[in-house]
Image (cartoon, helix red, strand yellow):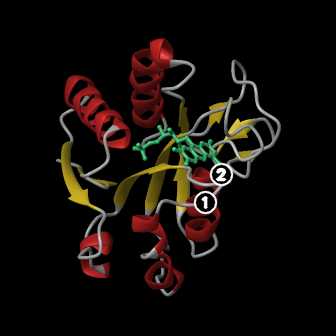
Amino acid sequence: MKKIGLFYNFDTNKTSKIAERIKKAFEEQSDYEIVSVDVDENMTEEQFMQFDHLLLGAATWMDGELPYYWDEFVPAMEDLDMKGKHIAIFGLGDQNNGRENFQDAIGLLAYLLEDRGAELYGFTSTEGYTFERSYGVRGNQFLGLSIDLENQAALTDERVTSWVKQLLEEKF
Ligand SMILES: Cc1cc2nc3c(=O)[nH]c(=O)nc-3n(C[C@H](O)[C@H](O)[C@H](O)COP(=O)(O)O)c2cc1C
C-alpha cells in the first residue's frame, strides 16, 4: 500500500481543516495510507525524508511569506536531496487582501524543492481566481492546489475532491 506523508501545522485552524479534508478525500478515493506529520520546531529531516510521496500544506502570510513553521525548516530543506521525491502542495491564501502575493507560499516551497530534484504534482488552473500577482503560479497554473476560504469557501470541497482525483490520475 502506498504511504503518503501529509505535512502541516496541527495548531493552525484553516490549514488543518483543509488537510483533514484532503486526508478524507484520499481515504474515499484510494486505499493509500495517509500519515499526518506536525510541521513545528520539533520536526526532523528524518521525519520529512521517510516518505517518497509528500503532501505539504502552507498558507501564505504577511505579504507573500511562508508561515514561521515552514520558514524555520527552510535551512534544513536547502540541504536535502529530493531526487525521487513526489511533492504535491496545497496552499491557502486570500485573493482579495493578498492579491499582490496570492498563494506565494506554494511557489516558495515548490521552487525550493524542485531545485533540489523533487517532482511536483497537482498543478491547477488559475481560472476562477482574481488576483494581481502570485509567485505560486507558473504559466497559467498554480504549482499546487489553491484554496481561498475567505472569498471562495463554497468551492473548497469540490476543489479538494477533484485535486485528489487528479493526483491519483497523475500517479502521484
Ligand atoms: C496577517 C495576514 C497576512 C496575510 N497575507 C497573505 C498574503 O500575502 N497572500 C495571501 O494569499 N494570503 C494572505 N493571507 C491570508 C491567509 O493565507 C489565509 O487567511 C489562510 O486561510 C490562513 O490560514 P491559517 O489560519 O491556517 O494560517 C494573510 C492573512 C493574514 C491574517
Which is nearer the N-term, disc 2 or disc 1?
A: 1
Q: Is mark 1 within 8 Å of ligand 1?
A: yes
Ligand 1's image quarter is top right
- For the point 60% across and 34% down, the residue is 94
Q: Position of residue 165 (x, y in %)?
A: 41, 26
Q: Which mark is residue 7?
A: none
Residue lying farthest top? 154
Instruction: Say which element carries label 2.
Output: helix
Q: Nearer the viewer, residue 70 or 45?
A: 70
157 relative to 142, above or below: above
In whole angstroms, how far apart are the C-alphas of marks 2 and 1?
Answer: 7 Å
Q: Nearer the viewer, residue 2 or 49?
A: 49
SS state under label 1: loop
Q: Give the class, few, some or many, for how many residues have Cα within 10 Å of label 1's Cα (few <14, many ≥20).
A: some
Residue at the disc numbered 2: 104
156 up-or-down from 26: above or below: above
Determine whether label 2 and label 1 are within 8 Å by CB. Answer: yes
Residue bearing the label numbered 1: 65
Name the image quarter holding residue 32.
top left
- The residue lying at 64 percent from left, 55 percent from top is 107
Q: Amino acid at mark 2?
A: Asp
Task: Give the residue type at disc 1.
Answer: Glu
Q: At 56% from the left edge and 61% from the top edge, which residue is drawn? A: 109
Within 8 Å of ligand 1, the CB of disc 2?
A: yes
Residue 28 position within the rendered picture, expressed as x and y whole percent measured from the top left: 22, 23
The crowding category of the residue bearing disc 2, from other C-alpha atoms within 10 Å (few below 14, some 14 to 19, many at least 20), is many
Say which quadrant the C terminus sits in: top left
Viewer-nearest residue: 154 or 119: 154
